[in-house]
Image: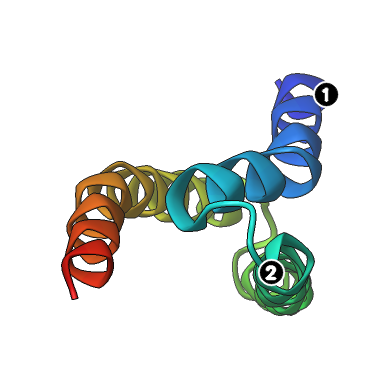
């Protein structure tokens, strides 16, 4: 389970930002947008490492950390799916001006 999660997480952290940014914001300034998204992901990775350690110290198990990571993954998926129609509306409003 940990190996599969690591593989999916690595893919989400390296490939998805470029695909999502190009689809939602277009190719203009793709490097800046992707760099910003990737930087925010790296900050999240730093916070997760610290929080996981704190949860392990408090409970003696990583089970609570996995639950928190699962909940955060579900929230991230919801926001990612919701961002597409929001980006489409933004593109339409910019094109119409």
Residue 35 x, y percent position in the rendering:
77, 70
Q: Which mark is residue 38?
A: none
- In the picture, the quarter occupied by the N terminus is top right
Q: Which residue is mark 2?
A: 29
Q: From the viewer's perspective, is 7 left or right of 76?
A: right
The nearer-to-camera label among 1 and 2 is: 2
Tell me the crowding category of disc 2: few under 14, some 14 to 19, or many 20 or more residues within 10 angstroms, Cα based.
Answer: few
Name above or below for residue 70 compared with residue 33. Answer: above
Residue 38 x, y percent position in the rendering:
74, 65
Q: Residue at x 44, y 51 (%)?
A: 24
- In the picture, the quarter occupied by the C terminus is bottom left
Does label 1 or label 2 sit earlier along the sequence?
1
Q: From the viewer's perspective, is 65 left or right of 74?
A: right
Name above or below for residue 61 compared with residue 29. Answer: above
Q: Nearer the viewer, residue 40 or 92?
A: 92
Residue 21 x, y percent position in the rendering:
57, 53
Element at label 1: helix
Q: Nearer the viewer, residue 92 or 57?
A: 92
Q: From the viewer's perspective, is 21 left or right of 74?
A: right
Q: Nearer the viewer, residue 15 or 75?
A: 15
Q: Residue at x 65, y 69 (%)?
A: 33
Snapshot quadrant of residue 11: top right
Q: Which residue is mark 1?
A: 3
Name above or below for residue 94 compared with residue 4. Answer: below
Name above or below for residue 45 compared with residue 11. Answer: below
Tell me the crowding category of disc 1: few under 14, some 14 to 19, or many 20 or more residues within 10 angstroms, Cα based.
Answer: few
Cα distance in 3D space between marks 1 and 2: 34 Å
Q: Residue at x 76, y 75 (%)?
A: 39
Q: Nearer the viewer, residue 22 or 96?
A: 96
Residue 90 x, y percent position in the rendering:
24, 65
Snapshot quadrant of residue 19: top right
Q: Residue at x 20, y 47 (%)?
A: 85
């Amino acid at each position: 389970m940990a190996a599969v999660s690591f593989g999916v997480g690595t893919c989400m952290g390296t490939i998805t930002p470029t695909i999502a940014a190009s689809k939602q914001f277009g190719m203009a300034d793709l490097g800046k947008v992707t760099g910003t998204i990737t930087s925010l992901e790296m900050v999240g990775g730093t916070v997760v490492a610290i929080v996981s350690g704190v949860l392990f110290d408090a409970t003696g198990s990583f089970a609570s950390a996995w639950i928190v990571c699962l909940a955060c993954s579900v929230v991230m998926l919801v926001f990612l799916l919701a961002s597409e129609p929001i980006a489409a509306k933004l593109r339409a409003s910019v094109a119409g001006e």
